Amino acid sequence: MARTKDSILAHCIGRGVIAEFGGYDAAVDQFGANAERLSKWGALKAVAKVTPKASRVGGFIVMWAVAMRDEGRADFTITEYQRYWNENERQAYRLQKEFRELWPEFETPNELARQILKHIDAKGASKSEIVSLPTRLQMVA
């Protein structure tokens, strides 16, 4: 897939739709390289179906970045994420599993979180601005 610049949520939704149809190659075989054989209704249904998961994963990536920033770390583990956010162990691993379903090339969100950290640090983003990052921040993926 070509690397594009878009919001975290948009990347997660796009990846969710592709995963829903069995991966990139299966989606291309079924709908064409530019989804020309996917109806507008079919696209709308697919997006509606994957948006909850995409939102959770987008939030997970941003929360991972915030924890890394507050801890002053360049890398983080799922255990450190769980400890920082006082997250239930099972929930933390469920989020990590969903992340890996949408971003299979990454073991953890560290690389994506570093892109977010560059933005947060450059802008001096407030906590209220950080909340809207999944829908606002443009990143390359």
Image: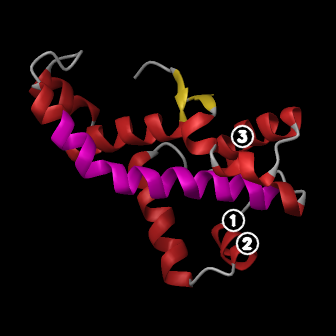
The reply to whether residue 69 is visible in this rendering is: yes
Marks 1 and 2 close (CB-CB < 8 Å)? yes
| Quadrant the N terminus occupies | top left
Q: Residue at x 22, y 16 (%)?
A: 33
| Quadrant the C terminus occupies | top right
- Looking at the picture, how far across and down is residue 110, in whole percent? 68, 49
Residue placed under numbered mark 1 in the picture: 77
Q: Earlier in the sequence, mark 3 or mark 2?
A: 2
Q: Quadrant of residue 129?
A: top right
Marks 3 and 1 close (CB-CB < 8 Å)? no
Q: In the image, 97: left or right of 113? A: left
Per the image, label 3 sits on a secondary structure element best described as helix
Q: Nearer the viewer, mark 3 or mark 2?
A: 3
Against 101, residue 78 (above or below) is: below
Q: Quadrant of residue 123?
A: top right
Residue placed under numbered mark 2 in the picture: 80
Q: Residue at x 48, y 66 (%)?
A: 95
56 inside magenta stretch: yes
Mark 1 residue crowding within 10 angstroms, few (<14) / some (14–19) / many (20+):
some
Residue placed under numbered mark 3 in the picture: 116
Q: Residue at x 73, y 72 (%)?
A: 80
